[in-house]
Amino acid sequence: MADRFSVLIEDNGERFSCDASQSLLRSMEVLGRRGIPVGCRGGGCGVCKVHVTGGAYHTRKMSRACLSEAEEASGVVLACKLFPDSDLSLQVVGRMSKALQLRRE
């Protein structure tokens, strides 16, 4: 059985579990959860951009058109290409983050 990790979306307090072999975005969708905005699911649109604030992870190839090397180095990645290696905490980045913060208040 594959490892499963807990993921906290700090913007809205939502938690869900993520299988180590499945992208964060896909795990959230499979569980029927909402929280991270969904776009192309292929690493090319940047809609699912998140900032990992805690935990270990690895990523697959992401488009430089929507994510710079500096952003990636600071923990900003695309959820569709993010795979957990431990429990994670994250914040949604970009234009969709305001909607999540408003729902929380």
Image (cartoon, helix red, strand yellow):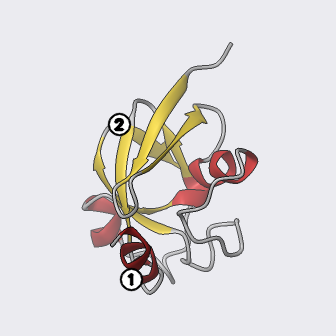
Res. 18 image quadrant? top right
Residue at (54%, 69%) from the top-left corner?
48
Which amino acid, mark 2? Ala
Q: Which mark is residue 56?
A: 2
Across and down, in percent, residue 81 comes to: 58, 55
Across and down, in percent, residue 53 comes to: 26, 52
Most extreme residue toward the top is 1
Residue at (43%, 62%) from the top-left corner?
77
Across and down, in percent, residue 96 comes to: 48, 81
Work out which quarter of the rendered image holds the C terminus and state it.
bottom left
* Label 2 packing within 10 angstroms: few (<14), some (14-19), many (20+): few
Residue at (58%, 71%) from the top-left corner?
37
Residue 65 at least partly seen: yes
Compared with 84, 53 (above or below) is below
Which residue is under mark 1?
A: 98
Front one among 64 and 77: 77
Res. 16 image quadrant? top right
For label 1, the SS is helix
Which amino acid, mark 1? Lys
Most extreme residue toward the bottom is 95
Across and down, in percent, residue 35 comes to: 53, 63
